[in-house]
Every structure is written in structure tokens, then in C-alpha cells.
Amino acid sequence: MSEFRMPSLGADMESGTLVEWNIQPGDRVERGQIVCVVETQKGAIDVEVWETGTVERLVAEEGQKVPVGEVLAVILAEGEKAEDKKAEGEKAQGEAAGREAPAEHPIPEAPQAPSPRAPDLSPPPTTAAPDVAAGERLRISPAARKRAAELDLDPAGVRGSGVGGSITLEDIERATRPAAEKQAAPSSRVSTTDTHAAMRQAIAAAMARSKREIPHYYLGNTLCVEPAMAWLEAHNAERPVAERLIFPVLQLRAVALALEAVPELNGWYRDDAFQPAEGVHPGVAIALRGGGLVAPALHDADRLAPDAMMAALRDLLTRARQDRLRSSELTAAGLTVTNLGDLGVESVQGVIYPPQVALVGFGRIAERPWVRDGQVVAARCLHASLAADHRVTDGALGARFLTRLTDLLTEPERLWPT
């Protein structure tokens, strides 16, 4: 049995609102299946499950705001039964009780005062909670029980709003608010958030953290992309417009292959150490029409053929602007790529998105004087930049990455060798 928890979908995400369940108790789920929709500061995200099994119960309900790490649902592994787990739990509780009260020490008949360090939070035997029958086990999440103990609050008198009347952390917090504040509080099912303002707050928090904590270093290189543009034009020459590649596909492919050569730039800095990414999934910075941006991962960019990468990029752009990104796309990127060339920008000096350790920026393609075979000619060029985390790499390694990137874009036949 495993607990499906609220994932962290951003550097500074603290909680998310469960908008919609796509599953019900008893349903079978497969690894990677979208099981719910969660609203965050950056929009609605399709959340995937990473276990295969059967839904035993839903802990959170639609409209509920759930902190990162809190349980959303309980999933039974294949072949596992809820009755088996219940029996195991009861057996473990019995063994624990036996250890705590051995036979040679009989339990006194007189009632004992509860310990101040371990208050008794179970329902009084003679008084039933509003939704709990006398003698029935109180349904309360571990986080709610812990918070109730901190507040010296008896949860038996709290009406639960969770699935099946279970008491949630939000129920405990609500029970301690002044009456006037409770009346003024909006319904959890009604969104009162200014989406654009919330997104700006999320971006501000992440970028402030980045500049505060990450010692950036910057490298840049101007490269001639005439060969890459010629390759692209030849590839697109006899194709319908809808099937043509765009230059960012070549850029993303070059970044992916350069990361294979310098994997130290592909991953995250967590707990004072570098954690390498398991695959090459560069994040693609996407400006949203209503303002703000997201940087979902383009999965397996080092393995995709040209047309498959174009299709994956087009799908990613479409879903990002429709608020239909997936949780794996917001957590898998080990590096972000930003391309502002189509907006006329010459170069980009980017800010790393924590906990990632690097960001690649591309400027616009423009004709410039270029020396070729001893002659000055007009050639299409662009500026590529790297912002990297000095806690993980040094300039020499960053230079290796940029050199590899330059070689790939100036010799495009190496992008997809035949």
C-alpha cells in the first residue's frame, strides 16, 4: 500500500488546490496515468501517479487546498487487499499494546490523569462527534492530528470536510479561527485568486531565491549557424508547412547532446549536494499569452527523431497555453532553455530556476560579418549563453558545454547522425 501525496510542482510551491479527481475508489491505475487536476500559482496541472495498483480510498476532496507532501489518496499494490492491510495494522497495534502493558503489571482500575506530553486525542467514550458514532474510530489525517495536539484541541468536536467525513488539516485550522473570520472566509470551492498576480508572485519568489542562493557565473559564445540554417531549409524544402521543423528544434537537440557530454549541468542542487537527472529532459521556457511563463520539460530530447521532437514541442506549447501541463513536465527538467531571438533580443543572461543548476539562452539570428577561408562574408549568426551554478561546476566545465553546443550547431549532420 502506498500513499499518493501532493507533489511539489514549483520551486516555492507550498500547497495546491485539488480541482478534480479522474479516479474513484476501486479503480485500477497505471504508472504515469493522470489521476487528478491540481491548481497552483502557475495554473491547473494534470498530476500523474507513479504507482500501479488499485485506488483504496481518496483522502482529499475536490476543492480542498492541500499542502505539499500531504496524502491525496491511498493506492493498493497489485494483488494487495485492503483487508490484509487492516489485519496487519490491527495486529501491529495489538503487539504494541502488549509491549506497553505487560501482564506482570496489571492495569489499575482507577482512572489515571493523562500525561501532559502525550494528550489523549481519542473521542470521549460517552460523547460522539458530530459525524462519528460512539465507539467508532475517529477519521483524521496524521497532519491534522499532530496540529490538533499542538493547539491542545480535541478533534472529536471538529466536523470533518474530507472524504467520508474525515478531518483534514484545514478543518483543524478552521476550528481555531475567530468566528468573524470563519464567516468571512470564502468557500474552498470558489477560486478567488488573481491568476496573473499569483503567477508573478511565484516567479518573484523563485527568482529572488535564485539570485539570493545561487552563485551564478556566465559564459557566452557567438556562433555561425549558416550550416544549420542550410540543413533546416533543405529538410523543409518539399514538406507541407504543417510538417516543417523550426530552428528551436535544432537548438534543443544540440543542448540535449551537449548535456550528454557534460552531465554535470543536468540536474538539481538539493541538500547541499548535486543530484544528477536520470534522463535528458530540458525545460522549455514558454511565455504565456496572459503574462508570465512556465518551463515544462521536453522529455527524452536526446532520443527523439526530428519530426518526433517537432511534434512533442508543438504539443508542449499548446498544452502550456491551455493550462493542461502534466506534473512530470514541471518536475523533470534538469536545465532550462530560453529563446528570445524571435523578440529581437541579441543575447540572454538568464537566471537559473532553482533547484536546477544551469540555464541556456539564445538570442536572435542575424546576418553579421564572418571570416570564412580568409574572407569576410555575411553569415547568419546568433549568441548562445550559459548561466551556471558555481557550487556545482566551474567555468572550465561550462566552457566545455558551450564548445560542444557550438560544434553541434555549426556541424548539423552530427545532430541526427545517420
Image (cartoon, rainbow, N blue to C red):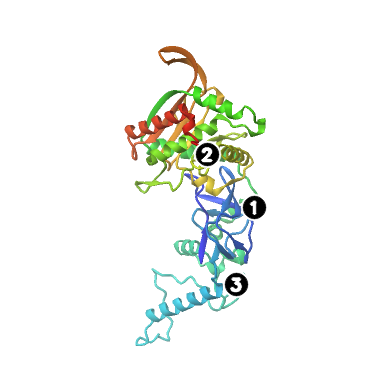
Report whether residue 198 is seen: yes
Q: Which residue is mark 1?
A: 189
Who is closer to the viewer here, 148 or 46?
A: 46
Residue 78's place in the image compared with 7, above or below, is below
Report, in whole angstroms, how far the alpha carbon at label 1 lies from the one at label 3. Answer: 24 Å
The residue at the point 54 percent across, 22 percent down is 344
Report, in whole angstroms, how far the alpha carbon at label 2 lies from the one at label 3. Answer: 46 Å
The residue at the point 53 percent across, 45 percent down is 329
Residue 287 in picture, x, y percent from top left: 57, 34
Tag 3: amino acid: Val
How many tags in the picture?
A: 3
Residue 58 in picture, x, y percent from top left: 59, 63
Tag 1: amino acid: Arg
Q: Assess disc 3: are there few (<14), some (14-19) or many (≥20) residues with their C-alpha within 10 Å of its C-alpha.
A: some
Q: Is label 1 in contact with label 3 (beta carbons under 8 Å)?
A: no
Q: Earlier in the sequence, mark 1 or mark 2?
A: 1
Q: Which residue is mark 3?
A: 132
Q: Which residue is mark 2?
A: 295
Closer to viewer: mark 1 or mark 3: 1
Q: Assess disc 2: are there few (<14), some (14-19) or many (≥20) residues with their C-alpha within 10 Å of its C-alpha.
A: many
Q: Earlier in the sequence, mark 2 or mark 3?
A: 3
Q: Which mark is residue 169?
A: none
Report whether residue 265 is seen: no
Quarter-of-image position of residue 109:
bottom left
Q: Earlier in the sequence, mark 1 or mark 3?
A: 3
Residue 221's place in the image compared with 254, above or below, is above
Q: In the figure, is residue 242 to the left or right of 202? A: right
